[in-house]
Amino acid sequence: MLRKFDDPRLVASLLELPDRLWRDARRNAGVSKRWFIDLQTALALDILLHVAPRIENLAALSFNEHLHWPQGRGKPALLIIRIEETKNESPLEFELPIALSDRLYAYRNDIAPAVIGRRPDFLFISRTGVRRTLWTIRVAIQRSMLRHLGVRITPHQFRHIAAKIHLDANPGAYELVRQLLGHKDLKTTTKFYAGIDTRRAGRAHAQLVARLRAARPERVRRRPKTPQDPRE
């Protein structure tokens, strides 16, 4: 699956997809029956791309417990996952970019209340205000990826994609990837993604050899020696 994302065009399309879905959903509000779910899928993809949470944590996101705006609207929001909610018993805290933070704020305080009649406690809800199940969220993400990018990707595989994107830009940055993914042991991170770095190292070395070959000095042509007189 990760080899598909060696194509920079596919990576660019993936990074642009949350914005595309958000704009389309906003434009289709009141027209399409699925616009409200599509809006949530756009937010889910943006969160997956930025902080790569496990699907269990993503599906359970609550505005009261996990999403906070300590500096108010227009500033980065914090996404906090408590120690008892993580697989490795380590709390996670991420700062979300302002654009995503503003969309989450607008969704919670303006968009969702217009649909369900009140501010929602949870991010993923139906039009009647009932929490959506983990299964429905996973299926919506997978269908969206297949429909718009033509690739089959599960929400969990976004964790691998996030690692690849970062390691492509910062070879060997395993410690940062470890912290992003919440791995307890650096060995876990290197075990999963060493293959990516092996291919990257091979490409980098091949490029170095090619540059050295292209820059090699021209050989000095030497005049052939004349046969030496045996009497000398």
Image (cartoon, helix red, strand yellow):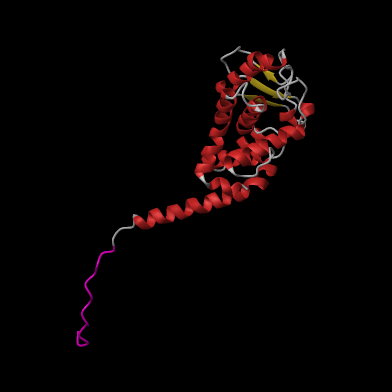
Magenta-colored span: 219-232
Choose between 161 and 208: the one closer to the eye.
161
At 58% from the left edge and 18% from the top edge, which residue is drawn? Answer: 102
Magenta span includes 72: no
Residue occupying the point 72% across, 35% down: 138
Instruction: Name the residue: 72% across, 32% down.
Output: 137
Q: Does residue 82 appear to the left or right of 147 in the view shown?
A: right
Task: Name the residue nearer the viewer: 169 or 123.
Answer: 123
Q: Say which quarter of the image contains residue 145.
A: top right
Horizontal arrangement in the rendering, residue 60 relative to residue 12 (left or right): right
Residue 71 to residue 202: above or below? above
Pick the front one: 215 or 51: 51
Q: Where 6 falls versus 60 (above or below)?
A: below
Task: For the C terminus, give its image quadrant.
Answer: bottom left
Q: Reply yes or no: does residue 229 show up in magenta.
A: yes
How far across and how far down the image is residue 33, in percent?
67, 26
The residue at the point 63 percent across, 31 percent down is 51
Q: Where is residue 71 shown, x and y percent of the image? A: 60, 12
* Residue 193 locus on image (x, y percent): 63, 46
Residue 213 percent coordinates (x, y): 37, 58
Q: Tell me where residue 154 sits by quadrant.
A: top right
Main SS category, magenta section: loop
Give the vertical position of 100 relative to 197 (above or below): above
Question: Does residue 219 appear to the left or right of 171 in the view shown?
Answer: left
Q: Is residue 12 visible?
A: yes
Query: For the view shown, which residue lies furthest in the bottom direction?
Result: 231
Q: Is residue 170 visible?
A: no
